[in-house]
Image (cartoon, helix red, strand yellow):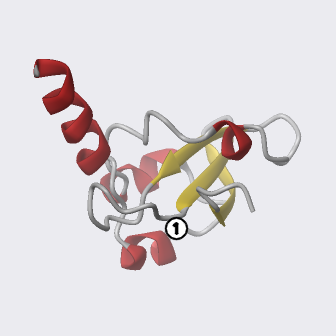
Amino acid sequence: MPAAVLLAWQLTASALPPSRFDELTPGRLRAELTPLLPVPAHPYPPGHTRSAPRPPGTTREFLPPGRGLLDEVDLYRLCWSGDRQVAKDTMPVKNR
């Protein structure tokens, strides 16, 4: 039971409302964007989403758009080069 509570917290705490996603402009520093980003990032993106092509040399974070805990919704992906955001997009949760 405690594991289920922790998972529910992780999934809801990592939500990023669409209005905030719109504010994230590639080229900005992570320090500028930190107040807009939830902590932690989505801990369990699907394998096909994790392995999707991304800009070379970048790291990525996945964030749900803040809908219901049990809804299957696409994820926001933020790509970082060092401490600078270089890309953002929406990734499908279902392998289409």
Q: From the image, which quarter does the C terminus lie in?
A: bottom right
Q: From the image, which quarter does the N terminus lie in?
A: top left
Query: Residue 68 at what x, y percent from top left?
Result: 27, 64
- Residue for point 83% across, 34% down: 57
Q: In this view, does 31 lie to the left or right of 84?
A: left
> In the image, is residue 17 above or below residue 60?
below
Query: Residue 87 at what x, y percent from top left?
Result: 71, 59
Q: In this view, does 56 lie to the left or right of 77?
A: right
Query: Residue 12 at what x, y percent from top left?
Result: 25, 50
- Going by the picture, which residue comes out furthest to the top? 2
Residue 77 sits in which quadrant? bottom right
Question: On the image, numbered disc 1 is attached to which residue?
Answer: 24
Q: Nearer the viewer, residue 63 or 6?
A: 6
- Going by the picture, which residue comes out furthest to the right? 56
Q: How many labels does the image show?
A: 1
Residue 59 sits in which quadrant? top right
> In the image, is residue 21 above or below residue 47?
below
Q: In this view, does 3 lie to the left or right of 64?
A: left
- Residue for point 27% across, 37% down: 10
- Residue for point 32% across, 49% down: 38
Residue 76 sits in which quadrant? bottom right
Query: Residue 63 at what x, y percent from top left?
Result: 46, 52
Q: In this view, does 68 lie to the left or right of 31?
A: left
- Residue for point 38% across, 79% down: 19
> In the image, is residue 75 above or below residue 51?
below
Q: Which of 94 and 51 is in front in this view?
A: 94
Q: Characterize the local packing of mark 1: few (<14), some (14-19) or many (20 or more) Cα atoms within 10 angstroms.
A: some
Element type at mark 1: loop
- Three-letter amino acid code at the position of disc 1: Leu
> In the image, is residue 7 above or below residue 81?
above
